[in-house]
Amino acid sequence: MKCTLEIKDEVNIRFNGVDTATRRKLGDELKYFLPQAYHMPSYKLGRWDGCVRFCDVGGRSYFNLLDRLIPILIADGYEIEIDDHRTPYTFDFKKVDQDTFKHLTWPKGHAVEGQPIVLRDYQIEIINRFIDNPQCLQQIATGAGKTLITAALSTICEPMGRTMVIVPNKDLVTQTEKDYINMGLDVGVLYGDRKEFGRTHTICTWQILASLEKNTKKYKNRLHLTQEEREQFISANECWCCGAAMDGKHEGGCLHISGTIDEIVSGVSCIMVDEVHKAKADVLKDQLSGMFKNVPVRWGLTGTIPEEEHEAVSCICALGPVVGQLSSKELQDMGVLSDIDISVVQLQDGVLGFSGYQQELKWLVTDETRLRHISEIVTSYAENNGNTLVLIDRLATGDILAEMNPDWVFLSGATKQKDRQREYDEINDVDGKVIVATYGIAAVGINVPRLFNLFMIEPGKSFVRVIQSIGRILRKASDKDYASVVDITSNLKYSKRHLTKRKKFYKDQGFPFKVIKVQYK
């Protein structure tokens, strides 16, 4: 029997001429049950089996999953012909060494500012491993210098065309931009109010790409409008092009988009995704297999590969296989990152009857007596050990803590990016500062070396959240080679279960920890 493997682009494939029974086998090979399905009506009613498949009934799948699918076809007796629609590319990347960028110097505020940029051995190994694998992922712990690695890769790719770097939030956009500027690269950013087009290198969030793609569809659907119909939109104070409210920026046409998503990604030969795990798996996969489907060089950098297998496979099918790992423990052993100890402070909250997890959590993070005691612990650490970051899940927690402690700074998504950055930068020059921030804005990406203490209030059971949060405290500073992590938890039912999970994370990562039970009422 013969079948055809149609390679549509750099990501998407389709098997043609395969019988139904074999297609079912292909689908079952890449089938994963979603734990959240238990709570979905469609699963409860039997309308859905609760699974996600990376090979559908029509034989459509992903190039980077062929190693899982080809053996099934061969076992069923198929002879495979290839129909390849990809544009041929020749990769001629030059390997790097420690002197590749020594003509550049570290910027102001860096631990070795003014000195030549000399790549560390492990950074050279990481970059050269990417060069050897044009489509791949590497798991690289926080503090390894991922933004420098990304900028170096963009420099190497310049002869091929433009590069685009996708990061999870605005803070990481501006942090990455600084490294690119320091490397002398022509860089622009896309997020919020800053939309800079036509640059050789672009740094953006996956959220802004989704927004621009949505606006482009609106724009294309409205191109047929007559001038009279366009004026009707304008008279209603609505841009005829994208539907945004009219203001000075829209005079004479829609400057809100400044080009379709097709124009924005045009000429991109390399796409890099930093902190892969922070993008929603399905959104990232759709973007990289949609608007970026023809980009030949695809690299992913992340501190933590998702534990959920379907999320990990989603990253692999969009970017490539995992070819390298560098853990926080390895960087600590090299002396690159600070040593830490973790104190699990288990507050003895008694035996309280809650109907479920959400009710219990709400009480744990909003009860004023409990938060007042937590405030006393935080204050003690800040006074004795220095600058402190307190990570919280709910805005209500931050409001209560800020009211109790007027000298603390509370940052959330509502805080402007430049104001957040100002608070982070101030830590370089002060001692005893306490910043309270939501996990959403501060658990990933921020680079604040002079943090000496990290408090995680009820961090839950997410491996990614916990390990990435600890990453905020690991960076060394001129006066810091050791830091403290305090895990605030409870003896209540669900909190206790989540702590069991976190203790396993700590053991697996080689982080020393101790549990302290505290009576506080």
Image (spheres, rainbow, N blue to C red):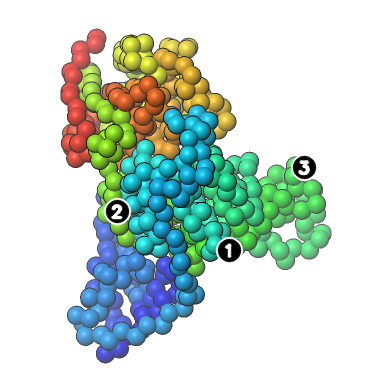
Task: Tell whether 278 sits left or right of 255.
Answer: left
Amino acid at dot 1: Gly
Amino acid at dot 2: Gly
Name the residue beneath numbered marker 3: 248
What residue is shown at x 68% (from left), y 49% (from top)? 256
Whether the residues at callouts 3 and 2 have beta carbons within 8 Å, the answer is: no
Q: In which quarter of the image is residue 356?
A: top left
Q: Residue 491 — which label?
A: none
Q: What element carries label 3?
A: helix
Going from N to C along the chain, the mark reached first, 2 or 1, is 1
The quarter of the picture where the C terminus appears is: top left
Q: Is residue 417 visible?
A: yes
> Which of the two marks, 2 or 1, is nearer to us in this view?
2
Where is residue 150? Give x, y as percent. 45, 49
Going from N to C along the chain, the mark reached first, 3 or 2, is 3
Q: What element carries label 1?
A: loop
Where is residue 34? Give x, y as percent. 28, 53
Q: Is residue 521 above or below residue 391?
A: above
Amino acid at dot 3: Gly
Where is residue 216? Give x, y as percent. 62, 58
Where is residue 462? Give x, y as percent. 29, 39
Going from N to C along the chain, the mark reached first, 3 or 1, is 3
Q: What element carries label 2?
A: strand
> Which of the two marks, 3 or 2, is nearer to us in this view?
2
Name the residue beneath numbered marker 1: 267
The quarter of the picture where the N terminus appears is: bottom left
Task: Tell whether 395 sits left or right of 322.
Answer: right
